[in-house]
Amino acid sequence: MTYKNFPMVSKVVFGRGSFNQLGDILSPKRLNVKAPFIYIVDDVFQGNSWVTSRIPLAYDDKIYYISANEEPKTSQVDDLVEEIILNYKALPSGIIGIGGGTILDLAKAVSIMLTNEGESKNYQGWDLVKSPAIYHVGIPTISGTGAEVSRTTVLTGPEKKLGINSDFTPFDQVVLDPELTKDVPVDQWFYTGMDCYIHCIESLNGTFLNAFSKSYGEKAYDLCVELFLDNNLTEEEAQDKLMMASWHGGMSIAYSQVGVAHAMSYGLGYLLGTKHGIGNCIVFDHLEEFYPDGVKLFKKMKDKHQIKLPQGICSKLSDKEFDIMIDVALSLEPLWENALGKHWQKTITRSKLKELYLKM
């Protein structure tokens, strides 16, 4: 038995207001005055001086404001990389992502592709990256995805939605400042928080489970239950705890995997552009067969927070469109093996997946 030697985020700072320390964290990492820091920032913060005034710009540093309305695409990564290479005489000193999972994944992918040849679509998969990424920093402004700690960056390519899963993907530095999550809308808070909850359910019920994954998954699960079903937390306590739930939920799949909801959600995301958090919720709502206790509790959380999920999003799809979603879902073999074991294909057929998608 050979065990994987996983990398982790090598440095992390946690605390309310820790975003103020960004300049001190980055300054020793500047290679020279011609090597800028490139900030990839959710465009929701454009014009928000509470955030932008604290981004420590110097020399040729630049902020790219990126919409998170659509999840990152391989073409978007390639365009950003090309623009950076053409505009600067040296590789950047670092890439800093400030936003939710979409922005963090984009920052991770750009940092990888600045040092690896070709197109990012060629690196979608497991352990295909050959050269270390440039220094990259993740600063989450919404909690739940685990993108700040994971070894993947999920991209929609021309043929599939799949992560660049590699030892070079995790951030070198993460800044966890719960204050940055204070203005997240309630529905988005729920969807992204449920991404964390679903990570836990899929990890804790998976065939890959071991003591490492279980310890992180159980802690994240307990935090999610407290956050989404208790009424006794202050707003600040809830922000702090969800940020740590996200971290633990992301860590829970390092030595494990996600499962049915994520595999099927990738199909929705690829074909329909459904955002990851809400896509997971739409799928998970119909997975009692696979996760009976987890779905029961999910429905309780959904009712408590008066969340109404979109209905009938697959009702008008053609057979060809169903086939596209099914192909994407079936391509995620490690997820199915974790969910159902080595002989998962006996349970998960094309007709079974179509039956499930038709419920959505």
Image (cartoon, grey):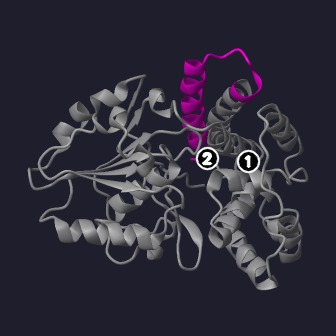
The residues colored magenta run: 227-254
Residue 36 is situated, as x and y percent measured from the top left of the image, at 18, 53
On the image, which quarter does residue 229 sit in? top right
Q: Is residue 263 above or below residue 248?
A: below
Amino acid type of disc 2?
Ile
Say left or right for 165 vs 186.
left
Residue 353 shows in this picture: yes
Q: Is residue 237 magenta?
A: yes
Asked if the residue under mark 2 is in contact with the one under mark 1, i.e. CB atoms within 8 Å, the reply is yes
Q: Is residue 271 above or below residue 40?
A: below
Residue located at (35% from left, 43% from top): 47
Amino acid type of disc 1?
Glu
Residue located at (50% from left, 33% from top): 181
Q: Nearer the viewer, residue 43 or 326?
A: 43
Residue 313 is situated, as x and y percent measured from the top left of the image, at 78, 65
Query: Mark 1 vs mark 2: which is more N-terminal?
Result: 1
**Residue 202: assigned label:** 1
> In which quadrant is the N terminus drawn?
bottom right
Residue located at (75% from left, 74% from top): 326
Residue located at (10% from left, 56% from top): 34
State the separation of the CA atoms marked 1 and 2.
9 Å
Q: Is residue 293 magenta?
A: no
| Residue placed under numbered mark 2 in the picture | 253
